[in-house]
Image: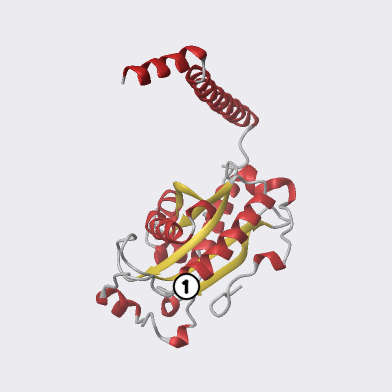
Amino acid sequence: MDSSQTPLKPEEAPIAAEPQNAISERFRGFFPVIVDVETAGFNPATDALIELAACTVTFNDQGQLVRDESFHANILPFAGANMEKSNLDFLGVDPYDVNRHALTEEAFLKPLFKTLSKKAKAANCTRCILVGQNGHFDHSFVMAAAQRVDPKKCPFHPFSVIDLATLSMVLLGQSVLRVAVETAGLEFDTARAHGAEYDAEIETDLFCWLMNRYQELGGWPLSPEMQERARIANETKKLNFAKKEYQDHKKQDDAEKLENSPFAILKTLVHCDNN
């Protein structure tokens, strides 16, 4: 789906539930979204986000991870954004060119966030996790834009990412995107590179290839013993979290009871009289 000209309208199409919650089981309750951004600088707080693309993945009938949906838009710089000329020259982009059919951050990101949240929920996932080549860079710009638009609606984990360069280095011995793609036997189109839409799609194809390769090598699914250890660890974490929540609520309730107790009220009255 290309959203270069019109905002996304996620409410128009219902999203089917993920069969057997395979995505949730594979990625610890996270919903992977492969993201690539093009920017007018390297500082996410001050420099313009000028293009963003995102792709989702799913499991096919053969149990292979494959590319699912794609979302893309050219983005208008936010008010007061800094734009480094060297970055724009490298990309060959005029951010204000009317032929880009660019959308504001709000017009694109709000419906995108809503769509991704719905897809994550349908897959029984708690939230999205960003996947990207040197993904912390893309993540920093997405989170900065979300802060400007509506931080409460951002579906991505606030700091965790799945870094494609690291995965490629572990499974292929390569970290450069083009070299990793070609090593995997996929075709890399140099002419389309450094555009968010193409980069997100080729990164998605590489991510799927790496996950499927790992499965072929016997790394997934986990052995029954490993699954049991993971289950125990997760259950222990949930219990500890619930216990801490209960203790925090109890402390708050006790503080409120003490504040409203007759002794506290009398103490307050005496203090007022003395002053």
178 displayed left or right of 106: left
Residue 101 place in picture, x, y as percent: 49, 82
95 up-or-down from 107: above or below = below
| Numbered label tally | 1
Residue at the image point whose x is 41% and y is 63% from the top: 177
Q: SS of the residue at dot 1?
A: loop
The residue shown at (32%, 17%) is 274
User: Closest to the observer: 41 or 190?
Assistant: 41
Query: Does residue 201 appear anywhere in the picture?
Result: no
Q: Position of residue 84 (x, y in %)?
A: 26, 73
Q: Quadrant of residue 243?
A: top right
Location of the N terminus by quadrant is bottom right
Label 1 crowding class (10 Å Cα cut-off): few <14, some 14-19, many 20+? some
Q: Position of residue 64 (x, y in %)?
A: 65, 55
Q: Going by the picture, which residue comes out furthest to the top?
A: 263
For label 1, the residue is 104
Q: For this rendering, which residue is in front, 151 or 212? A: 151
Q: Is residue 211 left or right of residue 74?
A: right
